[in-house]
């Protein structure tokens, strides 16, 4: 049987033999955030059972954030700006973003830009 699987901005087709027991698991009635940006900031402002990232980061001046490559559907362009702001609020002045590629090929500038900002017009600064 043929299955279309999300892969970066596109899909790939995988053929899986009929005798394999394939199941797609999806969340039951997911609760959609009406304002994703607000929910991200709320999570950073009110973490569960721990200090805010800005409090944890206070004694350091540099930080590294590892993000997934374009084969993963992580909304990096929505998560990074508030995450970096929270680190800056704790006194972090230098943030480096590293793309965790695993065994995937190197990311081209356009792919990194798309993952970082959701668009591909300008290089990442």
Image (cartoon, rainbow, N blue to C red):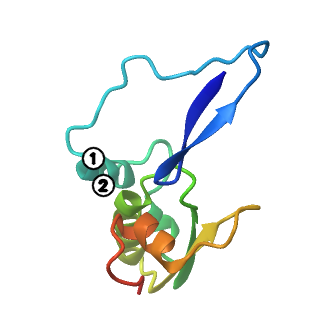
- Residue 96, placed above or below residue 9: below
Q: Residue 6: horizontal and vertical position, in percent?
A: 53, 42
How far apart in space, not on screen, are marks 2 and 1 (Cα)? Answer: 9 Å
Q: Residue at x 24, y 50 (%)?
A: 38
Q: Is residue 110 left or right of residue 85?
A: right
Look at the image and tell me whether residue 54 can be seen: no
Q: Residue at x 49, y 72 (%)?
A: 112
The kind of secondary structure element at disc 2 is helix
Query: Observer-nearest residue: 8 or 52?
Result: 8
Q: Residue 55: horizontal and vertical position, in percent?
A: 45, 66
Q: Residue at x 36, y 18 (%)?
A: 29
Residue to which mark 2 is pinned:
41
- Residue 68, placed above or below residue 20: below
| Mark with earlier residue (2, 1) | 1
Q: Is residue 66 left or right of residue 73?
A: right
| Quadrant where the C terminus is found in the figure | bottom left
Camera-near label (2 vs 1) is 1
Q: Are marks 2 and 1 in contact (CB under 8 Å)?
A: no
- Residue 30, placed above or below residue 78: above
Instruction: Spot the residue most to the left.
Output: 34
Q: Which mark is residue 36?
A: 1
Q: Residue 45: horizontal and vertical position, in percent?
A: 33, 54
The kind of secondary structure element at disc 1 is helix
Query: Observer-nearest residue: 17 or 84?
Result: 17
- Residue 111, placed above or below residue 4: below
Query: Observer-nearest residue: 17 or 74?
Result: 17
Q: Which mark is residue 84?
A: none
Q: Residue 124: horizontal and vertical position, in percent?
A: 42, 82
Query: Observer-nearest residue: 16 or 23?
Result: 16
Circle 1 residues within 10 Å: few <14, some 14–19, many ≥20: few
Q: Is residue 68 left or right of residue 51?
A: right
Q: Residue at x 66, y 73 (%)?
A: 106
């Amino acid at each position: 049987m043929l299955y279309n699987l999300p892969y970066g901005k596109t899909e790939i087709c995988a053929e899986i033999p009929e005798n394999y027991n394939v199941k797609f698991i999806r969340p039951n009635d997911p609760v959609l955030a009406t304002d994703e940006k607000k929910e991200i900031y709320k999570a950073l402002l009110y973490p569960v059972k721990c200090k805010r990232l800005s409090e944890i980061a206070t004694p350091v001046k540099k930080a590294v954030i590892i993000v997934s490559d374009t084969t993963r559907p992580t909304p990096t362009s929505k998560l990074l700006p508030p995450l970096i702001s929270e680190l800056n609020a704790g006194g972090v002045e230098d943030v480096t973003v590293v793309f965790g590629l695993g065994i995937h090929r190197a990311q081209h500038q356009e792919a990194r830009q798309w993952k970082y900002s959701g668009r591909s017009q300008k290089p990442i600064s």
